[in-house]
Amino acid sequence: MTNRRDFLASLAAGSLAAMASTAAHSATRPRVVVVGGGMAGATVAKYLRLWSGKAIAVTLIEKEIRYTSNILSNLVVTGQRSLSTLYFGYDGLMSKYGVRLVRGTVEAVTPGSVDGTWQVRLANSPRPIECDRVVLAPGVRFDPVADLNDPTRAAPVVHAWQAGPDTELLRQRLAGMPSGGTFLLSIPRAPYRCASAPYERACLVADLLRRNKPGSKVVVLDANPGIVAESNAYADAFSERYADIVEHRPDTAVVAVDAERGRVRTAQGEVVRADVLNVIPPQRAGAIVQALGLTDADDQRFAAVDPRNFESNVLPGVHVIGDSSGTTLPKAGHIGNQSAKICAAAIVNAFNAEPPEPWPTANHACYAPIGSGQAAWRNDVYRYDAQTGNMVAGNGAAGSAKAAEPSAQVFAEMTTWFRTLMTDTFA
């Protein structure tokens, strides 16, 4: 397709009949089922309806009554925000865009009654939902961490890497930590959800401890060889601003946890003690992605997809977006929104017998709080590169920019960015 804007305008003008004729397997009109109502799932549901002029019937399946944003949840841990400010509902998607919302958990996706269609089966319903395409956006699943005292069992860990009750519990434990105590944060090997966020959490906690609990320290056990994201900003923070509080230890993976006694064992066999443990487990694609066998053959952690449309390399007609997809894009809420738009545009094209955009782009803004009221900022634009088959930052018309130094102004801008992003996703 040479002019996507003209095509989308024609849809908005009323091309339901043309689209329905290309969805040969649909009895009425094109149907898409979206599994998961996070940043990626909510965005793709909204924009499938918006960009098709409501010609595509969209069903969103989500087990929770609302979405709790992981973005800015570190500020809940340190008491700078309340968890309720991170709640977002689905009323706008239903009332403004006509998205059908179904509560439930998907347990299977199987071929439909007609060749080329799919049946999405829910654990709480005897009747499957039939559709022409499926979009999976289940987020991440957390791997178990062995119990230090019994390696055959999984240890209970408070990671707060899925915003919700764990976030509040970690805040309470941090508030109850004695002065002179130790907060231990472990970082899994990349990729994981929001690469910069563990370092952000370490800085925010260090800032809090300095002000409220003198003599305390933060120990960061990092399974990666170095700081994964925003390396300059966080390296400077660790070595200068928080040099007396933060101890960052790269190449140090946590392999076992004794939650009751506040101990962890590293891959090197060392046992490290702390007053508060915050162990972030390794992550992989959501359970339904694993169950369908959509993960990359080499890594087995995330779904192998074509980044031009996020269609599975294993099952044509099934798309995987957000944190569950295995691409060169970062795993972050803003990228979830961006990958959903690429996917939505490609599906709209497909129902009109058109190929996806040949060189899609994705914008990634990353705000990184360094301390109370100060943040750094970086923006990268990724573009599809035909030679590598990947999304590449700074490719062609794409580029990047960042703030020279953390500042109060950037921290204030972060709130505006967050509000704009969530409005674009849910409103």
Image (spheres, grey):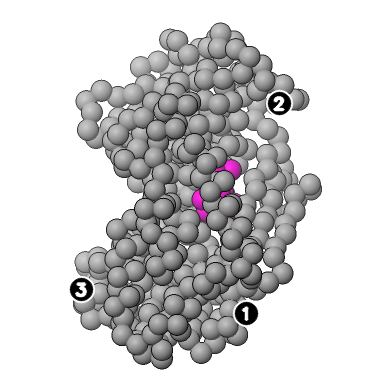
Q: Of the residues tagged 2 and 3, which is closer to the observer?
A: 2
* Residue 83 placement (x, y as % from top left): 37, 57
Q: Which numbered tag is attached to residue 158?
A: none
Vertical side of 48 occupied by 242: above or below: below
Q: Relative to 105, does residue 244 appear above or below in the rendering?
A: below
- Given contact means CB atoms under 8 Å apart, are the residues at marks 2 and 3 in contact? no
| Helix, strand or loop for disc 2 | helix
Q: Which callout, 2 or 3, points at the residue further toward the start of the chain?
A: 2
Residue 150 badge: 3
Q: Hey, which quadrant is residue 339 in on the image?
A: top right
Residue furthest right as drawn: 396
Please give the range of residues in magenta: 328-338
Residue 342 image point, x, y percent: 60, 37
Q: Residue 77: horizontal and vertical position, in percent?
A: 39, 67
Amino acid at pointer 2: Arg
Graded by Cα atoms within 10 Å as few (under 14), some (14 to 19) or many (20 or more), the crowding at tag 1 reads: few
Residue name at image x 48 percent, y 13 percent: 29
Which one is earlier in the sequence, the residue at label 1 or at label 3? 3
Residue 203 covered by magenta stretch: no
Which image quadrant: the N terminus?
top right
The residue labelled by disc 1 is 236
Q: Is residue 30 left or right of residue 216?
A: right
Give how far apart the Cα atoms at labels 1 and 2 are: 44 Å
Disc 3 is placed on an element classified as loop
Say which amino acid is labelled 3. Asp
Where does residue 67 sit, x and y in percent of width and height?
39, 45
Q: CA distance from mark 2 to mark 3?
A: 59 Å
